[in-house]
C-alpha cells in the first residue's frame, strides 16, 4: 500500500501562515521582540531594518536532514513573495561561521538544498 507524501513542516507552516487573515494594522504579535543579526557576507539586519516586512525566520543546522529536505520549499516561498515584502532569514543554530561557510561552499551539500 503506497502512502501519500506528507507535507513537510515548512510547507505546512507556510500554508497555514498564508491562509491567515491578519489585519494590516497589526505589525507583530509581540512588539517587544528585538534582534540583531549579520549575514555571512556582513549584511546587518535588526528589528528596525525589517520594519514593515513580513519576516520568516527559519532555524537550521548543517547536520539536520529535515532542514536539507525543506530548503527548496523555503527558497520557492522566498522567491515567490519577496517582491511583496517577504524576507526570509535562515539562522544556523549553534554552529561556527567556519562550519556554515564550508557547508554552503560544498557543491555536494548545496545540490541537496537548491
Image (cartoon, rainbow, N blue to C red):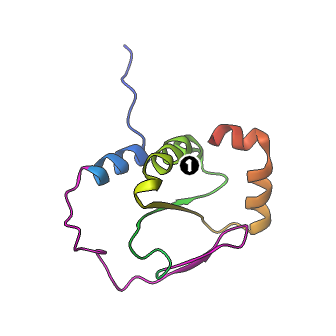
Q: Which residue is mark 1?
A: 67
Taking the spot 37% from the left edge, 13% from the top edge, the residue there is 1
Main SS, magenta residues: loop
Q: Is residue 41 above or below residue 70?
A: below
Q: Secondary structure at mark 1?
A: helix
Q: State the residue in front, 92 or 51.
A: 51
Taking the spot 45% from the left edge, 54% from the top edge, the residue there is 83
Q: State the residue in front, 24 or 70.
A: 24
Asked where in the image residue 69 lies, by quadrant, the reply is top right
> In the figure, is residue 25 to the left or right of 86?
left
Asked where in the image residue 43 lies, by quadrant, the reply is bottom right
Taking the spot 36% from the left edge, 86% from the top edge, the residue there is 32
Relative image position of residue 26 (x, y in whole percent):
24, 73
Q: Is residue 92 above or below residue 71?
A: below
Relative image position of residue 84 (x, y in whole percent):
40, 56
Question: Per the image, is 21 magenta?
Answer: yes
> In the figure, is residue 13 to the left or right of 74?
left
Stretch of the chain drawn in magenta: 19-46
Relative image position of residue 17 (x, y in whole percent):
30, 54
**Pointer 1: residues within 10 angstroms few (<14), some, or many (20+)?**
some
Taking the spot 30% from the left edge, 51% from the top edge, the residue there is 18
How many numbered marks does the figure carry?
1
Amino acid at each position: 500500500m503506497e502512502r501519500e507524501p506528507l507535507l513537510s513542516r515548512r510547507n505546512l507552516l507556510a500554508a497555514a501562515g498564508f491562509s491567515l487573515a491578519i489585519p494590516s494594522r497589526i505589525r507583530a504579535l509581540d512588539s517587544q521582540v528585538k534582534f540583531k543579526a549579520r549575514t555571512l557576507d556582513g549584511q546587518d539586519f535588526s528589528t528596525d531594518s525589517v520594519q514593515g516586512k513580513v519576516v520568516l525566520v527559519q532555524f537550521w543546522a548543517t547536520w539536520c536532514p529535515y532542514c536539507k529536505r525543506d530548503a527548496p520549499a523555503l527558497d520557492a516561498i522566498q522567491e515567490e513573495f519577496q517582491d511583496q515584502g517577504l524576507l526570509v532569514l535562515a539562522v544556523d543554530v549553534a554552529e561556527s561561521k567556519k562550519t556554515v561557510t564550508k557547508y554552503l561552499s560544498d557543491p555536494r551539500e548545496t545540490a541537496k538544498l537548491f
